[in-house]
Amino acid sequence: MEDKKISSELIYRTIDIFIILVTLFVGSPYTNFYNVEGYLIAGMSAVMLFSFVGRLMDIYTSWSGRPLRDEAVRVSMTWLITFLSLVFIAFVTKTSEQFSRVVLLAWLVITPMLLVLARYMLRLIFAHFRRLGLNNRTVAIVGMTQHGLHFARDLENNPDYGYHVVGFYDDRSDRIHKEVLDHYPNLGNFDDMINSARAGEWDQIYLALPVEAKKRMLRLLDQLADTATPVRLLPDYFTTNLLHSKFIEIADNPVLCIYDSPFSGDHALIKRIEDIIVGTLILTLISPLMLIIAGAVKLTSPGPVFFKQTRYGLKGEKIRVWKFRSMTVCEDNGDIKQATRGDERYTRIGEFLRKTSLDELPQFFNVLQGSMSIVGPRPHAVAHNEQYRSLIPGYMLRHMIKPGITGWAQVNGWRGETNTIYKMRKRVEYDLEYMREWSLWLDLKIIFMTIFKAFNDKNAY
């Protein structure tokens, strides 16, 4: 197992070194600033810095089963930090004049593209071998439970991840999930599992016991500590919520925040500064476009340019959200029909505005006003809020933070009409995940992803 990890990391490191050096040296000899020694020092320094920063950014750990976009972001950030560090060193040492600006710019832009492309190609190659049954990790699950079965099926449906579920262990007949036995073999009781772990039969063991089996789990963990097999926990719904909660200290006592806003103290200040700076910049850039859209709305249909609808904002307080009017009606009452594909209420340019999300641009005024953020859960009409709060557990937790123009749910495909409870539940899941995982970098990532998805979103209408 360790040999596989080392060999995989060696492949990634070797390709990274090759790309960084080749990208720098391909165009260098054709410039008037070519200095072999200087470019060689720059290249080797970049390789060492990238390796060091990459270790801190975890780009060489196993990314099996994790999204490519997350790996691509980390790789790109690693390269950006490396490049800016080299530029700073060149400035301090007064050696920047030795290098061609064209070459450096090409190096900055092309290198991360090739690094990400290389990882994408390696994923395809590794996935092909895994589908053939090569280099797969064997996984045994302890506890025939619903969340254990769900995990096993997710691995089975994604063979590219390289995990093979060999079966389940359990020794209590009242806990055995009959649906599990229809798909996976029963490998034995917990004593058999301990013996298999000591013998190193499986690459990984996952505990999927229910939260009420605390004593048995502690006993199993104590026994598994006497083995060399990696052990991981599959939390149920209750445990998942606890793991995502944060600890604070009040009067020298640890307190677990089950439901809480991520924006308190300095985080709230950072979020507000981000909204003001980024919002002002974007609003300045899009002002000419907004004037054109306003004229088009006014000329193509009777009625106001802007449509203001009541939504729930921070702490469930009502706010007025601005949009360019895209329909012939301005509904804002207790019975609001969601927009559907080919909706007959669209104005002549309304469908285009909604498809491209251009109708959302006036909401930057809401951002500067302070009632919304650029990134956050999308605000729903009051009527829809009252409908879904009784159907989806945790729905109103979205209102612990300001609503946003774009959000984590939207860039992950959960945008548009929510004509089923499942779609709204998925949107809420991503909104709550955003609240748990918030960081300034996550906001910038969502903004970046929104720019590329805005004009190519099949769920926008």
Image (spheres, rainbow, N blue to C red):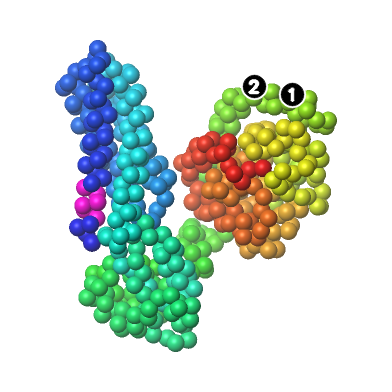
Q: Earlier in the sequence, mark 1 or mark 2?
A: 2
Q: Nearer the viewer, mark 1 or mark 2?
A: 1
Q: Quadrant of the N terminus?
A: bottom left
| Residue 27, label in figure | none
Which class describes the residues within 10 Å of circle 2: few (<14), some (14-19), or many (20+)? few
Q: Main secondary structure of the magenta part?
A: helix
Displayed quadrant of residue 19: top left
Displayed quadrant of residue 2: bottom left
Give the residue type at disc 2: Pro
Toward the left, the furthest residue is 37
165 to the left or right of 291: left
Locate residue 225, reporting x and y percent: 27, 73
Give the residue type at disc 1: Gly
x 19%, y 27%: residue: 41
| Residue 295, label in figure | 1
Q: Secondary structure at mark 1?
A: helix
x 55%, y 32%: residue: 278
Q: Quadrant of the C terminus?
A: top right
x 66%, y 58%: residue: 420
- Per the image, is 197 magenta? no
Which class describes the residues within 10 Å of circle 1: few (<14), some (14-19), or many (20+)? few
Toward the bottom, the furthest residue is 173
> Magenta span covers which residues?
5-10
x 64%, y 38%: residue: 355
Q: Secondary structure at mark 2?
A: helix
Locate residue 69, reporting x and y percent: 42, 45
| Residue 288, label in figure | 2
260 to the left or right of 24: right
